[in-house]
Structure formats: C-alpha cells, structure tokens
C-alpha cells in the first residue's frame, strides 16, 4: 500500500513537472519588460489626461498641472484634459483622433472604468466589453507613439451611497460595486506590468485614507455622492500620480554651519550666495529652481491627509552653530516665523508657511490655473460632452435604420456639431492665454533670508 502511494505521488509529481516544462516551452522566447519608472520630460512634451466625469471635474488634473508649473517652471509642457462626464472606454475611442492624438502626447493617463462597470455587481458580458474596448484604446495609444499610463478606477463609497437621502440603487450594487472596480483595476495593473506601461493606483489611497479616518469619524467621506471625489479626494488622486510616476519629491534644502572664521553653506534645488554673519544671527540669499506645490484653499484637508508638503514639496532650512535661544526668520524683510536654535539645528520646513514669498507666488499660480480650468478648459470639455451624446445617438441610429425619429434626431445633432473644430480651437487659445500668464508668474526669484535673535 505504501509503495502504491509513493508510486502515485511520483507519477503525480512527474505529471506536474511535465506540465511545468510544457508551460515553459509555451513561453519560449518570452522576455519580460520593465515598467515605466518615471516620466522622462523635456520642454514641449505633451501629456493628456483621458477619462470620464472624474477627470471632467478638472480638479486632480488641475492639481497635477500645478505641480508641473511649480516644479518645472523652466519647462513648458503641454497639458490637456480629455475627460468627459459619463464616458466609457468606447466613448474615448470615438473622440480619440481629435481629443487625444491631435495633441501628440508623449504620455496619456487613463481614468476609465467607473461607468464601464454600470454600477452593479460583476457581470461577465459587461466586463468583456470593457476589456475589449480598453485593450483597443491602449493599442491605439501605442500606435501614435504615446506611453499609456492606466490608472485604477477610483473608489465607490458604499457608505456615502447609503447615507444619501434618496437612494434607489439596489443594495447589491451599493455593497458590491467597489469590489467590481477593484477587479477592473487589478486587471489594468497586470496589463501595465506586462506591457511596460506606467501605472497609478487611485483606488488604494482613497480607500486607505477613508478607512483610517472612519476609526474616529464613522461618517467621514472624500466622495459625498459616492462616485465623484471632492477637492480633498482629488488631492489624494494627484498625490497618487506624483508618487507612482516617480516624480521629484523635494523643492529645496539649505544647510548652514558656523565655522571658525565664517559661515559655510550647502544647498540643493537652487543657488546659495552672499552668506554673512550678523551681530545677532546670519543672513544669506537663495535663488531656488522651483516653487512649493500649493493647493487652492478648498483643498487644504487633502493636503493634510496626504502630508503632501512634507512628502512631496519639502523646503527645508537647517542651521548649526547659533547660540541657544529663539530666532526670527524674515524673508525679503517680512517676518515668516520664530524658531528655537534647537529646531533650526534639526531643520525647519517652510513649504506650508503661507507667509513666505515663494508660497504666495505658488498660490498665485494655483489660482490662475483654477481660473484656466473653470473657464476655457471646462468650456472645451463641454464641447466634447455634446459630441459624446451625438456619437452614442449616431451608433443607435446605425443599429436601428428603420427608426425615423432617431434618424431625424441624428440629422439635427449633425448640424449642431458643425463647427466643433473652430470652437475647440477657441477654447484652447483662451486656455493658452491664461497659461502664458502662469509662466510669467511661476518663475522663481532670489530671496534674502535673515535669521535674527528674537528679543
């Protein structure tokens, strides 16, 4: 009996080994590729943000644009929002040539899937449609020489959905839809890894922060309507993009040390000059190469929840050799804070100090870009929203050629859509005018720092 069992075991092992070898043979010639490590950017490169209504909100895209405007002020990137409310992967294919390819993108982020899953428990035919359309979309991006950056669908907040005063959604849909989006996002991650694309996890950070905050506030949500993150949630999304795409995390660091005869200094992220001892402290000039990443006022909770400043926008000042005591720091003659000599020796961080001239400069950039997004960019997205409705009706008319009412509707919409190219060009021109102002405002300046013993 024991011999027979051993024989069966070794036969099973041999079968498994043959199966494994067969698998290797089937993969013969397979060469894995490395995933995108970081964005390799130079002046004039184009980035397109393709997506649905969450992109159409012009928030996470706006905040990422703010990052590029302040972190790379001497690099003129072309940044284009290609989001349309209600879009699925199929809809993105219909406007691909004019709303994506026309901008000659080097990189294209893709945030689709929230609508593709149709807000119900997992359904195989629905999934197959999404996978086929998304696969075609990724192929078209490769075909124009762009690097796709798939992003997981964002979080569906089932608790926020249940808290709505009027909620007609079936309980199964509310309870299960967030897991459907997880499935879609996991597939995207596998595709991105196999193809060597970029990849951004939007789902994880939104869920993780929400779960953490609900330990003390059960009603906490970043997504009041369960689908569309507000400004704070969109900061979480912007941070996920900067994190997952390996972009620069620090603005500047300055380190001063008092020597025997003079102060010595070292700096990263700018030029340090004119260091001099004063009767009660030290003074120096610093000309940074970038500005801090500053959000508009309505998004400050998102800044705190993500620790955005410390993690992705640090401006540090470290001073060794000051006599014990408290010191007032002024920049260009304006007092920005008082710090102990011990704190200065450890280092202080200035990126979140709204009294500094560099913070105020970056805030002006953010507010200009907010104006750009709420004006011409929103107008542009409205044009493509109308086109999306037209494309869907046109498909219905093609599938129902005997429906006279539908045919007449499409004919009327065809007339309405006439001239869309000119309207798109007008919105783009208006957006560029504001962007020109941004690139006048975002150029870093030299500032004079003075540390003086506090009275």
Image (tube, helix red, strand yellow):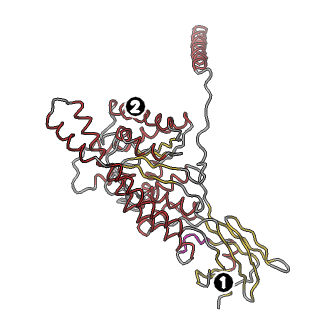
Asked if the stretch drawn in magenta spans residue 352, the answer is yes
User: 306 or 275, which is in the foreground?
Assistant: 275
Please, is residue 252 above or below residue 159 in the view?
A: below
- Give the residue at mark 2: 132
Q: Residues within 10 Å of mark 1 (few under 14, many from 20)?
A: many
- Work out whether 26 lies above or below 409: above
- In terms of secondary structure, where does tag 1 sit? strand
Residues 55 and 95: in front is: 95
Image disc number at residue 311: none
In three-dimensional space, the C-alpha distance between marks 2 and 1, rounded to whole angstroms, equals 63 Å
Answer few, some or many: residues within 10 Å of disc 2's Cα (few below 14, many 20 plus, some between 14 and 19): few
Q: Is residue 233 visible?
A: no
User: Is 69 on the left-hand or right-hand side of 327?
Assistant: left
Indicate the position of residue 392 as horizontal and vertical percent values.
27, 39
**Which of the two discs, 2 and 1, labels the residue nearer the N terminus?**
2
Residue of label 1: 327
Q: Residue extending furthest bottom? A: 455
Task: Say whether residue 279 is left or right of residue 16.
Answer: right
The residue at the far left in this view is 404
Bounds of the magenta segment = 349-353
Quarter occupied by residue 264: bottom right
Which quadrant of the view contains residue 300? bottom left
- Dot in front, 2 or 1: 2
Quadrant showing the C terminus: bottom right
Quadrant housing the N terminus: top right
Q: For the point 72% across and 75% down, which residue is it?
A: 319
Element at label 2: helix
Q: Position of residue 116 (x, y in %)?
A: 34, 40
Q: Is residue 8 magenta?
A: no
Please give left or right for residue 151 compared with residue 446 in the image: left
At x 63% / y 72%, what residue is drawn? 348
């Amino acid at each position: 009996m024991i011999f027979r069992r051993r024989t069966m075991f070794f036969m099973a092992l041999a079968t498994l080994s043959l199966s494994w070898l067969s698998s290797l043979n089937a993969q013969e010639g397979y060469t894995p590729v490395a995933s995108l490590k970081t964005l390799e950017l130079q002046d004039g490169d184009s980035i397109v943000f393709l997506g649905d209504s969450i992109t159409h909100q012009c928030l996470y895209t706006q905040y990422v644009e703010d990052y590029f405007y302040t972190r790379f002020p001497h690099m003129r990137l072309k940044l284009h929002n290609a989001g349309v409310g209600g879009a699925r992967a199929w809809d993105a294919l219909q406007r691909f040539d004019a709303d994506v390819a026309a901008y000659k993108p080097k990189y294209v982020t893709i945030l689709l899937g929230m609508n593709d899953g149709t807000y119900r428990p997992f359904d195989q035919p629905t999934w197959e449609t999404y996978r086929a359309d998304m696969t075609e979309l990724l192929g078209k991006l490769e075909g124009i020489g762009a690097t796709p950056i798939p992003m997981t669908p964002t979080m569906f907040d089932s608790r926020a959905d249940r808290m709505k005063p009027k909620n007609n959604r079936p309980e199964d849909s509310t309870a299960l839809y967030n897991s459907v989006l997880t499935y879609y996002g996991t597939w995207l991650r596998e595709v991105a890894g196999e193809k060597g694309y970029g990849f951004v996890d939007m789902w994880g950070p939104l869920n993780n922060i929400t779960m953490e905050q609900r330990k003390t506030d059960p009603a906490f949500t970043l997504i009041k309507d369960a689908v569309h993150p507000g400004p704070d949630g969109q900061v979480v999304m912007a941070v996920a993009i900067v994190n997952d795409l390996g972009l620069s995390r620090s603005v500047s660091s300055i380190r001063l040390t008092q020597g025997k005869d003079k102060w010595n200094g070292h700096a990263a992220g700018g030029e340090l000059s004119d260091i001099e001892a004063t009767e009660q402290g030290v003074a120096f000039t610093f000309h940074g190469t970038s500005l801090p990443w500053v959000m508009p006022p309505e998004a400050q909770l998102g800044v705190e929840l993500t620790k955005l400043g410390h993690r992705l926008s640090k401006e540090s000042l470290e001073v060794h050799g000051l006599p014990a005591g408290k010191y007032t720091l002024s920049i260009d003659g304006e007092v920005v804070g008082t710090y102990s000599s011990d704190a200065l020796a450890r280092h202080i961080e200035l990126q979140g100090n709204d009294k500094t001239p560099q913070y105020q400069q970056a805030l002006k950039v953010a507010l200009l870009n907010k104006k750009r997004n709420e004006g011409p960019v929103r107008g542009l997205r409205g044009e493509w929203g109308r086109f999306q409705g037209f494309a869907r009706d046109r498909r219905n008319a093609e599938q129902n050629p005997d429906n006279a009412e539908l045919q007449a509707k499409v004919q009327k919409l065809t007339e309405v859509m006439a001239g869309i190219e000119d309207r798109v060009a007008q919105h783009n021109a208006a957006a560029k005018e504001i962007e020109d102002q941004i690139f006048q405002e975002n150029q870093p300046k030299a500032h004079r720092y003075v540390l003086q013993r506090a009275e």
